[in-house]
Image (tube, rainbow, N blue to C red):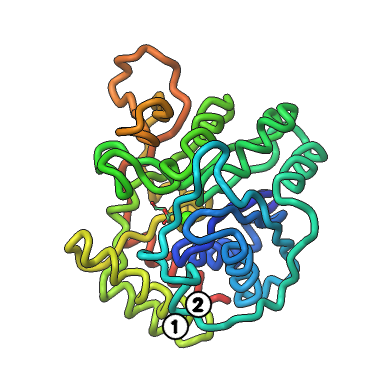
Amino acid sequence: MIARPIIIDCDTGQDDAIMLLLACAAPDELDILGVTAVAGNVPLPLTERNARLMCALAGRTDIPVFAGCSRPMVRDLVTAEEVHGRTGIDGYDVDQPKVPLQQKHGVDFIVETLMAAADDSVTLVPTGPLTNIAMALVREPRIVPKINEIVLMGGAAREGGNTTPSAEFNIYVDPHAAHVVFTCGRPIVAMGLDVTHKTLTTKARLAAIGAIGTPVGNAAHSMLEFYDRHDIEKYGTDGGPLHDPCTIAYLLEPGLFKTKHVYVEVEIHSERTMGETMVDFWGVTKRPPNAHWAQEIDADGFYHMLTERLARL
Ligand code: BDR
Ligand code: CA
């Protein structure tokens, strides 16, 4: 099997961190060309640090990590320390990453890597605000045909928003970037709250991760324990949603998900509904579909795979 080349772009909070660990645990399937960090859950100096911490924890000191944009394209940065804690990965206490930060800007890395790649060859996996990806698309439109697929975490339709009543965090933080990405013309798979809110880290699933008993298992357990406390209170569920790892899980086992090919448009005009993802489930706009919108997940299958993969590290 030839490993699929991917670039991961994240705003490393706890769920991004688990996503990185899962990706690192799949070297036969995924060739991680690099990780770019973006401002989102916490400011950029922490998201890039956290990405480096996770690569080091996974023993993947070979993966280059780059810092990208420190603010959204148009609007002011909104962060989410109330969810993720001061560092973004509270629950994991190590300070000094063993992986150095690359000097190159993350957007330059994306542009240069794609320009050197064959058409239709590199998959982008963004799990934060889409600033870096949109900036790369704006800066060098010739990268567009190089992209095989964009598998992102972001958006909400039937589930409603988690940051405003209509907007999900990643899209809300940089709606203009999301607009650029959703109109880029390449295939998109969107893991929004409609599916990630069905991906709950219940007590039993958390205990299974804790039972791995390795440094990675222990770190994943304590980060998720911290992360879940906020969402358990907010949603009144037995465990919080685990958003970002759905992207990598889709690449590894697409059969875990049910998606629908639909037209999605990002609201960038109304302050009240800024960042809403308008999903045309029934084709009423007559616009051509631009995204595969995730609707269902086999959550037990997902947690089984996640736990088994984390145990490999
Ligand atoms: C998304 O927002 C962030 O807080 C999470 O890391 C995830 O990417 C969920 O709305
Ligand atoms: Ca994220």
On screen, residue 131 versus residue 307, left or right, reads right
Number of the label disc, if any, that sits on residue 212: 1
Residue at 30 percent across and 26 percent down: it is 281
Q: Residue at left 41%, top 67%?
A: 84
Would you place residue 184 above or below residue 204 in this image?
Answer: above
Q: Would the CB of label 2 be found within 8 Å of ligand 1? A: no
Q: CA distance from mark 2 to mark 1?
A: 6 Å
Q: Is residue 104 left or right of residue 91?
A: right
Q: Quadrant of the C terminus?
A: bottom right
Left or right of 168 on screen, residue 136 = right
Q: Residue 275's quadrant in the figure?
A: top left
* Residue 265 spot, x, y in % from top left: 41, 26
At mark 1, the secondary structure is: loop
- The answer to whether marks 2 and 1 mark residues whose Cβ atoms lie closer than 8 Å is yes
55 or 67: nearer the viewer: 67
The mark that comes first in sequence, 2 or 1, is 1
Give the residue at mark 2.
311
Location of residue 35 in the rendering, given as x and y in whole percent from the top left corner: 66, 57
Q: Residue furthest front?
A: 76
**Left or right: 263 with respect to 273?**
right
- Residue 48 has which mark? none
Which residue type does callout 2 highlight? Ala
- Give, as a three-letter code, the residue at label 1: Ile
Q: Residue furthest right?
A: 116
Q: Secondary structure at mark 2?
A: loop
Q: Residue at x 71, y 57 (%)?
A: 66
Vertical relation: 151 (above or below) 267: below
Quick check: 14 above or below 195? below
